[in-house]
Amino acid sequence: MINIAVLGYGTIGSGVVEVLNTNGESIKKRAGEKINIKYVLDLREFPGDPIMEKLVHDIDIILNDPEVQIVVEVMGGVEPAYTFVKESLLRGKSVCTSNKELVAKHGAQLLDMAKERGLNFLFEASVGGGIPIIRPLNQSLTADEIVEITGILNGTTNYILSKMSDEGLDFNTALKYAQEKGYAERNPAADIEGYDACRKIAILSSLAFGMQVDFEDIYTEGISKITYNDICYAKSMGARIKLFASSIKEDNKVYAMVAPVLIKANHPLYSVNDVFNGIFVRGNVIGDVMFYGSGAGKLPTASAVVADIVDAAKHLEKNIWTIWSSKKLELTDVNKVKHRFFVRVVKQENIKDLVQQLFGEVEEVIVDTILDEYAFITSMQSEEQFNQKKENLQVLNAIRVRF
Amino acid sequence: MINIAVLGYGTIGSGVVEVLNTNGESIKKRAGEKINIKYVLDLREFPGDPIMEKLVHDIDIILNDPEVQIVVEVMGGVEPAYTFVKESLLRGKSVCTSNKELVAKHGAQLLDMAKERGLNFLFEASVGGGIPIIRPLNQSLTADEIVEITGILNGTTNYILSKMSDEGLDFNTALKYAQEKGYAERNPAADIEGYDACRKIAILSSLAFGMQVDFEDIYTEGISKITYNDICYAKSMGARIKLFASSIKEDNKVYAMVAPVLIKANHPLYSVNDVFNGIFVRGNVIGDVMFYGSGAGKLPTASAVVADIVDAAKHLEKNIWTIWSSKKLELTDVNKVKHRFFVRVVKQENIKDLVQQLFGEVEEVIVDTILDEYAFITSMQSEEQFNQKKENLQVLNAIRVRF
């Protein structure tokens, strides 16, 4: 029997308990031993819930109990999670976590601590909810040099964009739907401004390239400026707008970016709609692979946490090798990165001439029902060049084009 | 340094050598040590190829060399691969293989042999080419009870079906294209009759359910009966025809089947086109996940083989737990399995009445340009029921419907 402690009895914590109860028999087979929840830590009380028997309010009870071999941190947020996780490792306990803030900020250090002690620090659930991506990156794509990793990593924004597109809604109405469904928080900034996707691509990039990618260094733009007109233009091009979180290696340097992009049906992430997530990986020998599934939700996320618990149980005395050095990866200045841009500007006299003066030949995009705008796609240019040129126009919106 | 021997210098074998040469530095980092190809076994000579230095024609040289710690079997076919692999394990060498025939037939036994000796028998490349699926099934989806595993597992047939659909070709012309491109063998039966997909779903099913699924027990139907008219009807329904290899758990029993099916855009495998493969997995807690990538090809397959070599190198003295008992899984009699069927019959007098007598209410499917056929979709019925009823009609083709 392997004793574990679950820190946090919120959505994911209660999901972990549920999964261990529901699939206990087959999990035992795979882990080699029964996984026993000895403690659940939470400040709250849960009257009537059978978990009360195991509930403790004091982390020291868990830290001081040598019987606890695996600590499951599903509280979220950097503190006190960081302190609790560090202390757990110091006391010889492996840690599984779903906490993207913690992993993005302290992943390299916590992995080192685990490695030094022959323990494990596992975090499959921190990116892509239930989708297996951390373990495949670490253990399956080991023959490749990763050239690109691009994900639709935030279900809320993907739901909003899908809803806008499918039902012809404007951004605010779609956001309200997402909030009603429980997909978006009352304060939705972390999702819609791209901060959540940013932390997740920081984690994936650090693993893909083996060095620390700080989330603060990643250019991040959300979807709050996307309007229904953007969607109409996208449709007229046979394209969709998706919030991409990308790390791409070009000329031996990596650039990282979270931003809405236009893609067409030939992109593997085109069909990733609603609350689903998808992660596209390009390797120099494997070519393109893609992983798809529920990027959030109680049980899918808990499934990934429990898979980590099983792995930790199978490797109680053997560190699972993960390459993520704390040495910082120098990212390419995003201003130098080149894209084609889809641009909507206010129609004014001689607008076509003005655009041509600035951008040379462009591809016009026409939607019959939108009369007061002029829309076009530029040729490849750096962010810097584009930003200078657009000063001369009344730009309504600009979206990077990935086709 | 870890010494390996590669058995077979065909497409995949030379790919393995190429990947180890191309990405040697990063592979060394991940494996912890340099991977050194000490021998390549092949009956042929390769004059001018630097591999000649390492080429041997006698397996005993490899088996008798204690320095060889990992044997990479990429010859294909059951014999002599089976004998070579067994002997390698008996001599204390771990084995990585891409050989689906070998794994489908002897996987359970070879895994047992490896486990008893603290060695590893790894076969990521045997299904889905470069797509990580074996390792995720074994190590990532461990919290779940698998409810369904369905794959587009054969790139050749998927290419032929995509080509027929995109370019309006009949089956034989599309097959000829596939042969010209090198996707299909001169004798294409293994692909187009579904035998290849059958072996692969046998492997996936054995892993998903932890017991032996014999490929001989899997109902297998290829795509050679699919005509351009079927494609036209599919299009008129907004559907696509795909060769599915499926194992599905219903009422606690599993049925397995390889057959063409009709799916619509809401199915995660709908966008898996051309030579790509996709594998859809449904778990009781994770929900739906999907893995997508190149299902064949020299480098993608070699990438998966080399990832196994890295894993074997990291686990030289620790068996990676895989649950695949040699105990046979009793499959549901496929005659009892229920589907809706899309049926094309020769138009004759009172055909609608006749169909209604047999099948009750059906959904008619109409293609304006096809006048001499009557097409419809039945309600759910067992294969047995359907086969009885269809005796009364001049059936041109019948395809199972998965929407």
Image (tube, coloured by chain):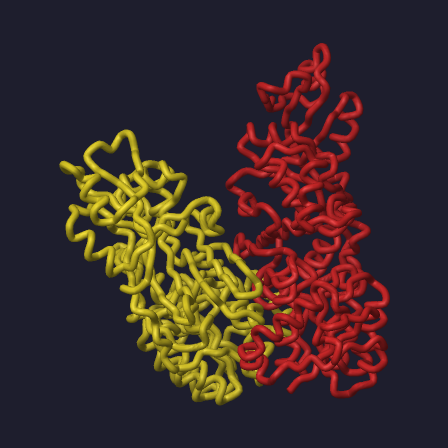
Chain colours: A red, B yellow
A167 or B195, nearer to the observer: A167
Q: Can you see residue B18?
A: no
Residue beneath the point at 66% across and 19% down: A374
Task: Residue A122: give x, y in percent of width and height.
Answer: 69, 70
The reply, left or right, for residue B73 in relation to residue A84 is left
Residue displayed at 53% across by 45% down: A271
For the point 41% across and 80% down, the residue is B108
Residue A332 in sight from this viewpoint: yes
Measured as percent of width and height from the top left, residue B60 is found at 39, 84
Q: How many numbered marks, from 0 up?
A: 0
Q: Quadrant of the N terminus of chain B?
A: bottom right
Residue B173: x, y in percent? Answer: 27, 42
Report the front residue among B118 and B324: B324
Q: Residue at the far top: name it.
A: A349
Using residue B259 as the reference point, say whether residue A81 is left or right of it. right
Work out whether B369 lies above or below A5. Answer: above
Q: Quadrant of residue B367?
A: top left
Q: Nearer the viewer, residue B185 or A243?
A: A243
**Image height check: is B67 above or below B209?**
below
* Horizontal side, residue B22 vs residue A360: left or right: left
Q: Is residue A117 above or below residue A179?
A: below
Residue farthest along the front direction in this orientation:
A48
Residue B12 pos. (x, y %) = 43, 63
Which residue is drawn at the image coordinates 71% and 73% (left, top)? A49
Give whichever of A351, A187 is nearer the camera. A187
Q: Is residue B272 above or below residue A131?
A: above
Asked which quadrant contains residue B87, the reply is bottom left
